[in-house]
């Protein structure tokens, strides 16, 4: 999303991301990738759960994560080993969701260019 951030801002839109990670782990990612947008914390993935977009990793996948040195319980400060489904939402100034791109495959992320294109179409349709 960083790659299209300036284009988002030209439309007047605000770009934010939501993660279950604790801020200290998110700050590292923000610094490493030089992110220029807000990264909000959804502790315990509670908001994600309300949307029905949280899933629990099975034991075998937990072991894969651990083998790579990733401890979700530590990074997210809660023991559930849950993750949000990757997705993006375009929400207008009245709080109406105008577009959604969410999928259960956590290895696939919505394309930033597609999101920007949809945003411009929504603005154009006015």
Image: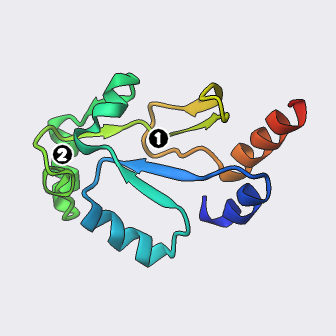
Q: Residue at x 86, y 31 (%)?
A: 126
List x then y, in percent, for residue 111. 65, 48
List x then y, in percent, for residue 93. 66, 35
Camera-side residue: 26 or 82?
26
Residue 35 disc label: none
Camera-side residue: 38 or 31?
38
Of all residues shown, which one is farthest toward the left? 79
Name the N-terminal-most of marks 1 and 2.
Answer: 2
Q: Position of 33 compared to 28: left or right?
A: right
Q: Residue at x 30, y 47 (%)?
A: 20
Q: What is the number of callouts on the image?
A: 2
Q: How is colour applied across the structure in the image?
A: rainbow
- Is 70 located above or below residue 42 in the figure? below
Q: Residue at x 22, y 54 (%)?
A: 65
Mark pair 1, 2: CA separation: 18 Å
List x then y, in percent, for residue 22. 24, 57
Tell me whether circle 1 and circle 2 mark residues in contact (CB < 8 Å).
no
The residue labelled by disc 1 is 86
Q: Position of 77 compared to 10: left or right?
A: left
Of all residues shown, which one is farthest toward the right? 124
State the quadrant of the N terminus. bottom right
Q: Foreground mark, 1 or 2?
A: 1
- Is 39 located above or below residue 94 in the figure? below
- Label 1 Cα crowd, 10 Å radius (few <14 / some 14-19 / many 20+): some
Of all residues shown, which one is farthest toward the front? 94
Q: Position of 116 compared to 126: left or right?
A: left
**Which quadrant holds residue 32?**
bottom left
The residue labelled by disc 2 is 62
List x then y, in percent, for residue 12. 74, 52
**Tag 1 secondary structure:** loop
Q: Residue at x 63, y 25 (%)?
A: 96
């Amino acid at each position: 999303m960083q790659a299209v951030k300036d284009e988002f801002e030209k439309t007047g839109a605000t770009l934010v991301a939501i993660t279950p990670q604790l801020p200290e782990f998110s700050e590292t990612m923000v610094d490493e990738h030089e992110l220029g947008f807000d990264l909000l914390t959804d502790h315990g993935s509670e908001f994600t759960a309300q949307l029905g977009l949280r899933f629990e990793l099975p034991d075998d996948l937990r072991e894969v994560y651990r083998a790579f040195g990733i401890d979700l319980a530590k990074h997210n400060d809660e023991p559930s080993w849950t993750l949000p489904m990757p997705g993006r939402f375009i929400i207008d100034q009245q709080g109406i969701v105008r577009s959604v791109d969410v999928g259960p495959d956590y290895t696939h992320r919505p394309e930033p260019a597609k999101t920007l294109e949809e945003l411009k179409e929504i603005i154009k349709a006015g």
